[in-house]
Image (spheres, rainbow, N blue to C red):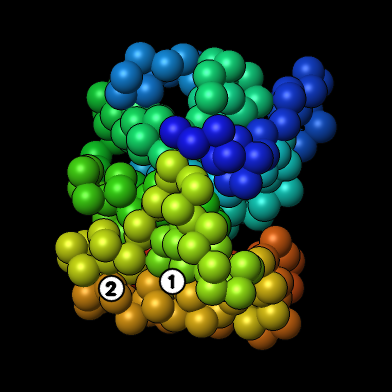
Amino acid sequence: MSLLDRFFIYYPERWQDRNWAKLSGLPLEDVWFESEDGVRLFGWYAEARADRPVLLWCHGNAGNIIHRLENLKYLYQLGLSVFLFDYRGYGQSQKQNPTENGLYQDAIGAYDYLTRTRKIRPERIVLFGRSLGSTVVGELAVQRTAGGVILESSFPSIEAVAKHHYAGLPVHLLLGAQFRLIDRMPHLSLPKLIIHGDKDDIIPIELGRQVYDAAKPPKDWYVISGADHNNTYEVGGTAYFRRLGEFIKKALGI
């Protein structure tokens, strides 16, 4: 890993010890599990009902799972069980420097926890990745089976993002991480919903469209008018959650 990765890619925040279940009104179950390479990780499991679809959520590069609580509440109200976890170095998870391969192994550990410990069938699981998490989900979907994939505010690679922000200069060559989601998309046969805000100035919509164009069918492209990088679910509102619900029902055949 390039030392610059820690300054340009990963922005974890420390844990704040409060009663988050009470404050959010959600049935948050504290979950400790191990990544594929043995790193101790922390997450929340919110079960809607034992037979409901399960959303495995890989979040973006900043903050920790606390900062996704409001969004988690809306997903739970949609009738989904949700497993949201922190990567290594984030929140309460083991204090180890995050790396590209490390994040992939963290996601595999989260998936294996659902299928091996909770005995959830793969066809009930929907992989949900936002921003950097979309690249993590791309690799996870190559290595494990699921009912469907939702990618939001996604990008083809670190190289593509760096060139956009630095006027085409090869800044990516100074970084260790590549996160080449674009290479995974042609290999994923499961249903895919790819979402992007048309006002995203961090990951412009053209980069999200490249991800969609590289994906093999079945796939759906959903643009949220007026949304930037961090407020898709807020701007999208009821229509956004309806679209998620429709995609999940169709992908899982329920």
Q: Give the residue drawn at x 51%, y 30%.
A: 98
Residue picked out by circle 2 = 215
In the displayed structure, would residue 231 be above or below residue 93?
A: below
Q: Give the residue drawn at x 73%, y 48%.
A: 70
Residue 91, horizontal then vertical, whole percent: 65, 26
Q: Of the residues shown, which amino acid type is indicated by label 1? A: Ile
Q: Is residue 124 visible?
A: no
| Image position of 158 (left or right of 141) | right
| Label 2–label 1 contact, CB within 8 A | yes
Residue 3, horizontal then vertical, whole percent: 55, 33
Q: Is residue 220 visible?
A: yes
> How busy is the neighbourhood of tag 1: few (under 14 within 10 Å), some, or many (20 plus)?
many
Q: Give the residue drawn at x 58%, y 39%.
A: 4
Q: Secondary structure at mark 1?
A: strand
Image quadrant occupied by the C terminus: bottom left
Q: Of the residues shown, which amino acid type is indicated by label 2? A: Ala
Disc number for residue 194: 1
> How busy is the neighbourhood of tag 2: few (under 14 within 10 Å), some, or many (20 plus)?
many
Q: How many marks?
A: 2
Mark nearest the camera among 2 and 1 is 2
Image quadrant occupied by the N terminus: top left
Q: Give the residue drawn at x 33%, y 81%.
A: 213
The answer to which quarter of the image holds residue 237 is: bottom right
Report, in whole angstroms, how far the alpha carbon at label 2 lies from the one at label 1: 10 Å
